[in-house]
Image (tube, rainbow, N blue to C red):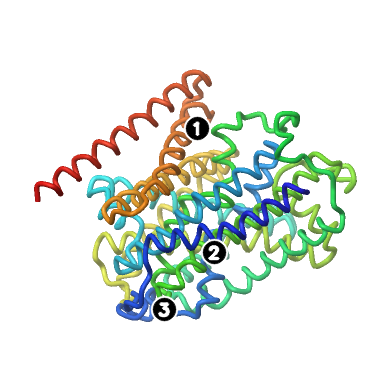
């Protein structure tokens, strides 16, 4: 528990100190924001700051800081280090730059920003890549909550399919309607429930004060996870530390903020808050896995993330905990799935330069996206291992998106002669991590650790050489001009 307390303090200090430093690199001012300059009543809608924060928090959170932290806790106390350092120095920085650069470029989507700073080829590649990732999120987050709701409603396949239809119908409505009509109204409620759930867990942790593995005991604690800590820990815990999916979500709120000066609490602060939620669940899971929690609760369920959430919540928080557990494993993925499809619509519309105020234009973009999502959903349902296959590819794709956003921020900082090292180091680290995971995991090529680590090291060196070469050419060109 000492590690838990130190980690909480570190996240708070990170927001107050490092967050302010990162803010100074952008230099927010009083220029009119896209929400005011480009107001259209659909996507560019000025919202209250507290509401922007709550929507951003739930957009980027979903079940990520819960499920990811639970599975990450199986790697032992090293999960604390990744959540804290990843969140402060990588994830929150990533989210802040993705949101603020979007505000500086008329609320531009992630591929648009990458095109501006990394070139058209990178933009076109990321356009297809990011849309596919978002559609995978949409498909997975229809099926998984439908399974749970179906089991509660009767447990047969027919009820599950009815819930699939209901959730997908909601996605269509939420994707097409103005952001303040549905998302702006219900998201703050779900975000509050997620925060209340985490706060309740934290209080019980302080009351129980369990004996947990500490970070200085990493070498003496045998991880329960069968995969190697590097790179698998850094892919498993994504949303609670660093997630490329967030870069597809931040532009939605960049179109709703009334002042650039609110970017730090809205983007950096929302990520730090998500880190706190992940920290709580990593600690709860550590008690569950390492300090007899599984036996104490007389649990006969498997050690899967949804079961851990349900068993612990109902035991610690009673009836309210049961309700919040349902919100956590059902409402949270639903509220990630709808914004994923909405982000996909905005990305395609930005690329086509298609005004989204007319409903006809929104349908023109959304219908093909819904069709592809339906095919992915069909694969998810018809294939017994469909969920695991799609989720495995999403995990790697998600962190690969973060690499591109971090490189984009690095180029921006170089161009503006700012401290680019703050994004260069995370960009190099995640490029190496994603390469290694693709090579070593069963989802990828399944190569030996020696080959995977060696190739990943080479990729890191090549990336660094590319950056140094590009920077020198740019400096030479500036001198000549």
Mark identifier at residue 305? none
Q: Which residue is mark 1?
A: 437
272, above or below 252, in the image: above
Mark identifier at residue 258? 3
How many numbered marks does the figure carry?
A: 3
Label 2: which secondary element: helix
The residue lying toward the viewer, choosing from 154 and 49, is 49
**Pointers 3 and 1 in contact (C-beta within 8 Å):** no
Q: Which residue is mark 2?
A: 269
Q: Position of residue 375 (x, y in %)?
A: 45, 49
Marked residue nearer the N-terminal end (2 or 1)? 2
Between the residue at mark 2 and the residue at mark 3, the CA separation in whole angstroms equals 17 Å
Marked residue nearer the N-terminal end (2 or 3)? 3
Determine crowd level at label 3: few under 14, some 14-19, many 20+ residues with C-alpha closer than 10 A. Answer: many
Q: Nearer the viewer, mark 2 or mark 1?
A: 2
Between the residue at mark 2 and the residue at mark 1, the CA separation in whole angstroms equals 29 Å
Please name the residue shown 62% across and 43% down the image: 81
Label 3: which secondary element: loop
């Amino acid at each position: 528990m000492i590690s838990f307390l130190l980690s909480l303090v570190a996240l708070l200090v990170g927001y107050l100190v490092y967050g302010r430093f990162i803010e100074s690199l952008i230099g927010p001012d009083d220029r009119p924001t896209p929400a005011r300059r480009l107001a259209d009543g659909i996507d560019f809608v000025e919202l209250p700051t507290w509401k922007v924060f709550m929507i951003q928090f739930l957009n980027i959170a979903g079940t990520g800081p819960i499920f990811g932290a639970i599975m990450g806790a199986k790697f032992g106390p090293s999960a604390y280090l990744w959540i804290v350092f990843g969140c402060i120095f990588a994830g929150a920085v990533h989210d802040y730059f993705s949101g603020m650069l979007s505000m500086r470029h008329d609320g531009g989507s992630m591929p648009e920003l990458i095109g501006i700073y990394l070139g058209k080829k990178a933009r076109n590649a990321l356009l297809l890549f990011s849309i596919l990732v978002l559609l995978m999120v949409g498909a997975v987050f229809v099926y998984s909550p439908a399974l749970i709701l179906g089991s509660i409603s009767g447990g047969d396949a027919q009820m599950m399919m009815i819930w699939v239809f209901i959730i997908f119908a909601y996605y269509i409505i939420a994707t097409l309607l103005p952001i303040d009509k549905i998302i702006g109204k219900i998201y703050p409620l779900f975000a509050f429930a997620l925060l209340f759930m985490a706060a309740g867990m934290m209080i019980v942790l302080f009351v129980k004060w369990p004996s947990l593995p500490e970070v200085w005991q990493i070498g003496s604690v045998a991880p329960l996870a069968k995969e190697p800590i590097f790179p698998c820990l850094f892919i498993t815990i994504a949303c609670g530390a660093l997630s490329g999916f967030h870069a597809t979500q931040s532009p939605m709120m960049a179109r709703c903020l009334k002042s650039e000066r609110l970017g730090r609490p809205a983007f950096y602060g929302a990520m730090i808050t998500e880190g706190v939620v992940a920290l709580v669940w990593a600690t709860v899971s550590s008690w569950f896995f390492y300090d007899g929690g599984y036996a104490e609760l007389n649990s006969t369920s498997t050690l899967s993330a949804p079961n851990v959430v349900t068993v612990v919540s109902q035991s610690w928080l009673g009836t309210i905990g049961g309700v919040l557990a349902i919100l956590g494993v059902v409402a949270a993925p639903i509220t990630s799935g709808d914004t994923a499809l909405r982000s996909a619509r905005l990305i395609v519309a930005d690329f086509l330069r298609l005004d989204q105020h007319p409903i006809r234009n929104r349908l023109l973009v959304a219908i093909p996206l819904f069709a592809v999502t339906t095919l992915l959903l069909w694969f998810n349902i018809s294939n017994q291992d469909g969920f695991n296959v799609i989720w495995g590819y999403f995990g790697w794709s998600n962190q690969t998106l973060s690499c591109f956003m971090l490189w984009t921020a690095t180029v921006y900082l170089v161009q503006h002669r700012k401290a680019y090292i703050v994004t260069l180091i995370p960009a190099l680290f995640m490029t190496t991590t994603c390469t290694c995971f693709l090579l070593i995991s069963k989802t990828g090529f399944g190569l030996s650790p020696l080959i995977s680590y060696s190739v990943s090291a080479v990729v890191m060196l090549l990336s660094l050489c590319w950056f140094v070469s590009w920077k020198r050419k740019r400096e030479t060109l500036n001198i000549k001009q």
